[in-house]
Image (cartoon, helix red, strand yellow):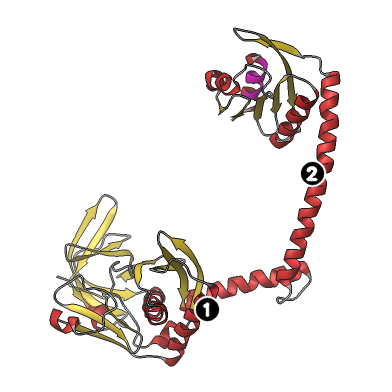
Amino acid sequence: MTIRLFDENPYLINCTSNIINMEKNNDDILITLDKTIFFPESGGQLSDKGWINDAKVLQVFEKDNIIYHKVDKDIPISTVECKLDWVVRLDRMQQHCGEHILSGVFLSLYNSRNHGFHMGEDYVTIDMDLKTISNEMIEKVEDAANKIIFNNNPIHFDIVDKSKADSLPLRKELKVDSNIRIVTIENVDCVACCGTHPNGTAEVGLIKIIKAEKYKSMTRVYFNCGLRALRDYQNKSKIVNDLCTIYSTDENSIKSKALSQSEKIKELSQELKKIKNLLLKDEATEILKNISYNSSIKNDLEEFPITKVFLQDKSFEDIQSLASFIMEDKKTVVFIASEKDKKILLAHDGTFNLHCGKIYKNTIKEYNGRGGGGDKIAQGSFESVDDLKNFFENIF
C-alpha cells in the first residue's frame, strides 16, 4: 500500500520515492510508488498534478487501495524525485475547504445539509436540501462564510475509530468503520473527509457564490474560492468597465442604462417589424399580380391552385410572412422557398383537402432534405441550394 504523505502534511511539495510498478493501460502510462505526495481524485476533490522526475503527472486515482499516477512518458523502475504543482494543490485545498465552510454555514443558518459536492476546473457546486433560496439568503451565507475566513479558524485533522467518531457532532453519516479521518473547522464544521485542507481558514482567501439554481428537489449552489474567486471578480470587473465605456456611464448607472437601451431596441424592433410587414404585404400582392407560373396540383379527389415562389434574398421568416399574406389575398396552396436559408414552406389556409406534412414525408428525403409538418403547413431544410432547387422544381 502506498504511504499517503499528503495526509500527514498537505504542505509537502517534494519527496523521494521508489517506483513499485509501471504498467500501460491502452495509451495510459500508470506508475505506482511506495509513498506519494500526490492526492488521488476522490471525495469530490480533483487530483493533484506535478512531476515524477521529468515526467508530468497528468492525473492521480485510487483503485483497489492502489494509488496510480498517470504520467506522460515512461519512467524506468527506480528511485525518483516527486514534485507537486503547488498552485494546483492550493487551488484544490481552497475549493474543498470552502465547501466545508459553506456546508457548515448552511447547516447553522438554515438547518440545510449538503447532499452533493463536485469540484470542476472552473467552479465548484454543492447540492443543498433547500427547495428555494433567496438572494438575501445567499448574501447572508456568503457574508458568514467570509467572516470565518477572516477569523482564520484553526482546522484540525484526526484519525479516530468508530466509537470516537460517533461521539463527534458530525455533519454527515459515516461511510467507513475504521481509520476514520475527521476534518474539524473550529466552531464551523466537523465531518469525515479524505481531502487536503489548509491549517486555517484564512488560506481559503475568499468565497464567492456565483449563482444558485433549482436541482431536483434541492438547490445547487455554484461558487469559487481563493484565486479562482479573484480571477472571476477580475473578469467580471473588466466586463463592467467595458460596458461603462460603451454606454458612457458609471458602474452604478450601467444597469438602468442597459435596461433603457433594451426598451428602446424593443420599441424600434416592433416599429421595424410593422414596416417590414407592410413591405412584405405589398410584395405578396406583386407576386400574385406578376407571377408567371401559377399552376395547379391534383390529388385523388380534386385539383388545387398553387403559387410557387423561389426567392434568393429572403429569410425563412420573411417567406413565412409572405405565405400568410398571399393566402389572405387568394385561395391557393403556397409553395415558397428561401435560397438564403435553404428552406422551403408548403402551406394552405385549410380550404383544401391536402396534407402538407405527408407530401414532405413521402418525398423530401429523396432530395437530401429534412422536414415535416401537419395538415396545413410543412417546412423543410436542405444542406445545399441545388437540392433545394431540385425539390422545388420537381415536387409540383
Using the image as rendered, state which of residue 377 and residue 384 is in the foreground: 377
Residue type at tag 2: Lys
Q: Which residue is mark 1?
A: 139
Nearer-the-camera pick, 116 or 356: 356
* Main secondary structure found in the magenta portion: helix
Name the residue: 40% across, 73% down: 88
Q: Is residue 390 magenta?
A: yes
Q: Quadrant of residue 173?
A: bottom left
The x, y position of residue 322, in whole percent, is: 76, 30
Q: Is residue 178 visible?
A: yes
Left or right position of 306 against 372: right
Q: Up-down: is 396 above or below 195?
A: above
**Which quadrant would residue 385 be assigned to in this image?**
top right
Asked if residue 344 lies left or right of residue 130, the reply is right
Q: Residues within 10 Å of mark 2 (few under 14, many from 20)?
A: few
* Disc marking residue 273: 2
The correct choice, above or below, for 41 with respect to 227 in the image is above
For the residues labelled 1 and 2, the Cα–Cα distance comes to 42 Å
- Magenta region: which residues? 388-393
| Quadrant of the frame with the C terminus | top right
